[in-house]
Image (spheres, rainbow, N blue to C red):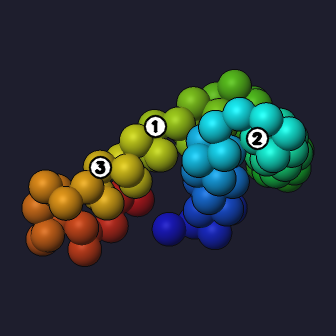
Amino acid sequence: MNPELEALLKAWDAYLRAKKGQEADRLLERYDAQLEEVCCRTKVGKEILDRAVQCAYQRWQWADAPKFPHALRKSKLE
């Protein structure tokens, strides 16, 4: 997996797990900062990259689900 995408996924996951409060606000700011940094470097729109992260996050969650086929967990989704 692309290291930048993985970092964004982990930042988004941390934000979602924090739920609410100051910690969640701080984690969302961190995610936004990482998103901005990648957008500036790659010349990709922020909304497009955010949607790509959300889509990849869904697939990442499905792959962690116990009912997800074990053979597909090993396949690369790139």
Instruction: Mark yes or no: residue 75 visible.
Output: yes
Q: Which one is closest to the eye, mark 2 or mark 3?
A: 2
Q: Secondary structure at mark 1?
A: helix
Q: Secondary structure at mark 3?
A: helix
Where, by quadrant of the figure, is residue 78 drawn? bottom left
Tell me the crowding category of disc 1: few under 14, some 14 to 19, or many 20 or more residues within 10 angstroms, Cα based.
Answer: few
- Above or below, 22 against 3 in this view is above
The x and y percentages for residue 33 are: 88, 45
Labelled pair 2, 3 in contact (Cβ < 8 Å):
no
How far apart marks 1 and 3 lie (CA) works out to 11 Å
Q: Earlier in the sequence, mark 1 or mark 3?
A: 1
Which residue is found at the position 14% from the left and 70% from the top? 70
Q: Nearer the viewer, residue 60 or 28?
A: 28
Q: Secondary structure at mark 2?
A: helix
| Location of mark 2 (residue) | 24
How many numbered badges does the structure rendering display? 3
Q: Nearer the viewer, residue 24 or 55?
A: 24
- Above or below, 25 against 8 in this view is above
| Amino acid type, label 3 | Trp
| Amino acid type, label 1 | Cys
The x and y percentages for residue 6 are: 59, 62
Instruction: Mark yes or no: residue 8 visible.
Output: no
How far apart marks 1 and 2 lie (CA) works out to 21 Å
Name the side, left or right, on which 27 lies relative to 3.
right
Tell me the crowding category of disc 3: few under 14, some 14 to 19, or many 20 or more residues within 10 angstroms, Cα based.
Answer: some
Which residue is found at the position 47% from the left and 46% from the top? 57
| Location of mark 1 (residue) | 55
| Location of mark 3 (residue) | 62
- Above or below, 5 against 28 in this view is below
Name the side, left or right, on which 63 lies relative to 72.
right
Where, by quadrant of the figure, is residue 15 drawn? top right
